[in-house]
């Protein structure tokens, strides 16, 4: 993941966002007393990034399928935004079964604009990016 | 209640205790984060293989369920919180804006997925994240984020999305602020009660919870080999480590936080057992961390061998160490 994956209006970049995070931890000092200690993220046992990477790998795999017209951009953006079918279905307020239907290119083409607008809002993209599939939106 | 003029931000180990501590401190009650965690009996263990969360992973909890700190601290300390929930989004944002105009500092439940100031990799659909809203500037809310060293900003529209995310533990516009704090609080009488409750939760709870739950998880891990695919096993171990070690746990799956509480309890009450228990709890925390480290390594190195009996034994060691601490604490409660 690079800085250009983060699409935001604010001038904050990817790195500054990470730097702002405080990994507070309670640790024993030399006298055996407990003190709060703020650790930087890079010396921390960090698991979130591998998880995000696993999701990105999946997104890449889906992207190939979307280009071959075997899947829909909705599935791609779902993995790109670190969601899974269950979470996205809950966020959309519909069943997983219905969501998975929308992964079929034929069904996706027939979706109305309101539904696409709802998806676009969750993915933080424009509706056109979904229809014309702009992968780095 | 003596409300401070200026809100002071600082980073905390855990989001829920962090917001509660910020709110109480702002209203003039000097209390530390481990104290709130301990008094609200936040320590817990539960492994629920039949309930799945994100990515089809079972729930592994190292603390009591979300919102229980807010409830627990009210019951224990006798402080009162005004608690509100909404159906109407516009009304919820209007009320928040009104409260902020009155210089009230408000705790809000949000979903991490919708908070734009987090790094992209962190924005997972987790709905029970707590933040403090302490002001408004240029049409943006000022956020005291327990995971950040400095205050952040958020647009009202983003905040509304975060407050009304759907799914498990949906926030439904949940917000809270203290309205009453007793003049005098006798901590020495409350600490044994809180420890007793945690003891009960850890030692007497049925199998998926407490120390029995830890043994259950260890057996579950040991028996995984052959049953599930290698990929699933790796991601399950990664999930366990993620739940235990990431932002908002204070490390060692809240065990360090509880040890800090025991030490503070010793300073107040001067019962030697407490200090000894604090030391043992730190050792248990180290064992937990060791276990998480091995899990994380197995998850990250895809080619490495998976030694399930070894991992299960590390977990059993942590469980045994923790059981000893709770048995020791039985004497004082």
Image: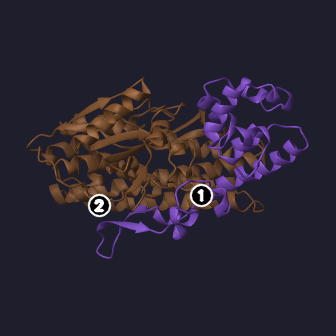
x%, y% of residue B241? 57, 53
User: Total label count?
Assistant: 2
User: In the rendered image of this protein, which colour is used for chain B?
Assistant: brown
Report the residue at 40% width, 44% height from top.
B130
Report the residue at 44% width, 68% height from top.
A39
| Mark drawn on residue B276 | 2
| Mark drawn on residue A47 | 1
x%, y% of residue B39? 26, 44
Image quadrant occupied by the N terminus of chain B: top left
User: In the rendered image of this protein, which colour is used for chain A?
Assistant: purple
Report the residue at 39% width, 58% height from top.
B256
* Residue projecting furthest to the left: B183
x%, y% of residue B100? 28, 42
Instruction: Name the residue nearer the viewer: A101 or B273.
Output: A101
Subunit of label 1: A
**Depicted A30 relative to depicted B249: above or below:** below
SS at mark 2 in the image:
helix
């Amino acid at each position: 993941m690079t800085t250009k994956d983060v699409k935001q209006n604010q001038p904050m970049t990817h790195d500054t966002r990470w730097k702002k995070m405080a990994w507070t931890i309670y640790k024993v000092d030399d006298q055996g007393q407990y003190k709060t200690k703020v650790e930087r993220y890079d010396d921390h046992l960090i698991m979130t990034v591998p998880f995000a990477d696993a999701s990105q790998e999946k997104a890449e795999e889906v992207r190939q399928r979307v280009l071959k017209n075997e899947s829909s951009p909705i599935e791609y953006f779902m993995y790109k935004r670190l969601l899974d079918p269950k979470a996205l279905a809950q966020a959309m307020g519909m069943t997983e079964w219905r969501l998975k239907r929308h992964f079929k290119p034929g069904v996706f083409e027939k979706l109305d604009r309101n539904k696409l607008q709802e998806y676009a809002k969750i993915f933080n993209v424009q509706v056109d990016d979904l229809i014309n599939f702009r992968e780095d939106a | 209640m003596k409300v401070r003029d200026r809100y002071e931000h600082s980073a905390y180990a855990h989001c829920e205790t962090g917001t509660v501590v910020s709110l109480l401190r702002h209203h003039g009650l000097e209390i530390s984060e481990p104290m709130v965690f301990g008094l609200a009996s936040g320590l817990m263990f539960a492994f629920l293989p039949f309930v799945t969360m994100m990515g089809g992973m079972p729930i592994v909890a190292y603390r009591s369920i979300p919102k229980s700190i807010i409830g627990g601290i009210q019951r224990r300390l006798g402080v009162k919180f005004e608690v509100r929930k909404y159906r109407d989004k516009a009304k919820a944002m209007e009320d928040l804006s009104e409260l902020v105009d009155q210089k009230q500092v408000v705790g809000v439940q949000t979903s991490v997925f919708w908070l734009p100031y987090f790094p992209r990799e962190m924005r997972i659909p987790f709905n029970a994240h707590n933040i403090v809203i302490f002001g408004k500037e240029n049409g943006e809310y000022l956020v005291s984020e327990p995971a950040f060293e400095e205050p952040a900003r958020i647009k009202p529209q983003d905040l509304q999305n975060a407050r009304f995310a759907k799914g498990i533990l949906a926030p439904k516009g949940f917000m809270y602020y203290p309205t009453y704090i007793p003049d005098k609080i006798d901590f020495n009488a409350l600490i044994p009660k809180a420890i007793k409750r945690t003891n009960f939760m850890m030692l007497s709870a049925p199998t998926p919870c407490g120390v029995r739950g830890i043994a259950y998880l260890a057996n579950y891990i040991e028996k995984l080999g052959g049953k599930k695919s290698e990929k699933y096993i790796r991601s399950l171990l990664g999930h366990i480590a993620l739940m235990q070690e990431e932002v908002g746990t204070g490390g060692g799956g809240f065990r360090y936080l509880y040890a800090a509480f025991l030490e503070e309890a010793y300073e107040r009450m001067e019962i030697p057992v407490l200090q000894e228990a604090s030391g043992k709890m730190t050792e248990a925390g180290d064992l937990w961390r060791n276990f998480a480290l091995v899990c994380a390594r197995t998850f990250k190195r895809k080619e490495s061998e998976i030694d399930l009996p070894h991992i299960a034994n590390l977990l059993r060691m942590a469980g045994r160490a923790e059981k000893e601490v709770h048995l020791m604490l039985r004497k004082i409660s």
